[in-house]
Image (tube, rainbow, N blue to C red):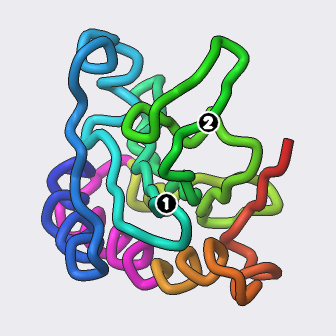
């Protein structure tokens, strides 16, 4: 039900904002762990001196929970511990700086159904949850931009290595 709600609500919201889906391919598509955590692959749009990238990350243990990872990726790619990584192959966790969108960032609480709905979840409950995520996309975009918007938002965690 969570995957369907994401397909129905969040993917169109990302497309409206100019993000294009980059499905999993190659080695990423063969990895069960990556397929479980990132079933939609990555989403990218031109921005700044490269691309803005978003990843919809699901809980790898199968719990119906989601968080959003976002970053600006330089178009020349990056140099990682394993060597150079082309722009199209960069995952957000490869970067030194990125942001994560949570239900409550200070405690790193992922978006999930309220406790009272977890025993008998409905498609509508998941759609409502995903609508809350879609409503936070402007906050996420602000955190990616130079404006500093979203800096103190309770949903955004800034990561800098």
Secondary element at tag 2: strand
CA–CA distance in space, label 2 to label 1: 11 Å
The image quadrant of residue 29 is: top left
Residue 78: which disc? 2
Please tell me which residue lies in front, 121 or 38: 38
Q: Residue at horizontal 24%, vertical 30%?
A: 24
Image coordinates of residue 104 in percent, x first then y, are 69, 66
Please tell me which residue lies in front, 89 or 34: 89
Task: Give the residue number, with chain letter if any, for mark 1.
Answer: 50
Q: Does residue 149 appear left or right of residue 8 in this picture?
A: right
Image coordinates of residue 6 in percent, x first then y, are 25, 59
Q: Residue at horizontal 34%, vertical 26%?
A: 36
Image coordinates of residue 54 in percent, x first then y, are 44, 56
Stretch in magenta: 119-135
Secondary element at tag 1: strand
- Kindly report the secondary structure that dominates the magenta region of the rendered protein: helix
């Amino acid at each position: 039900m969570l995957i369907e709600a994401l397909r129905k609500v969040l993917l169109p919201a990302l497309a409206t904002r100019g993000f294009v889906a980059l499905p999993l391919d190659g080695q990423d598509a063969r990895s069960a762990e990556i397929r479980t955590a990132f079933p939609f692959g990555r989403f990218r749009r031109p921005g700044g001196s490269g691309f803005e990238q978003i990843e919809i990350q699901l809980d790898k243990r199968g719990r119906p929970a989601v968080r959003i990872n976002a970053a600006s990726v330089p178009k020349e790619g990056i140099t990682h511990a394993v060597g150079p990584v082309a722009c199209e192959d960069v995952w957000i966790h490869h970067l030194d700086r990125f942001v994560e969108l949570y239900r409550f960032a200070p405690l790193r609480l992922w978006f999930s159904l309220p406790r009272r709905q977890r025993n008998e979840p409905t498609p509508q409950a998941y759609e409502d949850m995903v609508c809350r995520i879609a409503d936070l996309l402007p906050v996420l975009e602000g955190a990616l931009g130079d404006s500093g918007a979203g800096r103190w938002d309770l949903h955004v965690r800034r990561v800098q290595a």
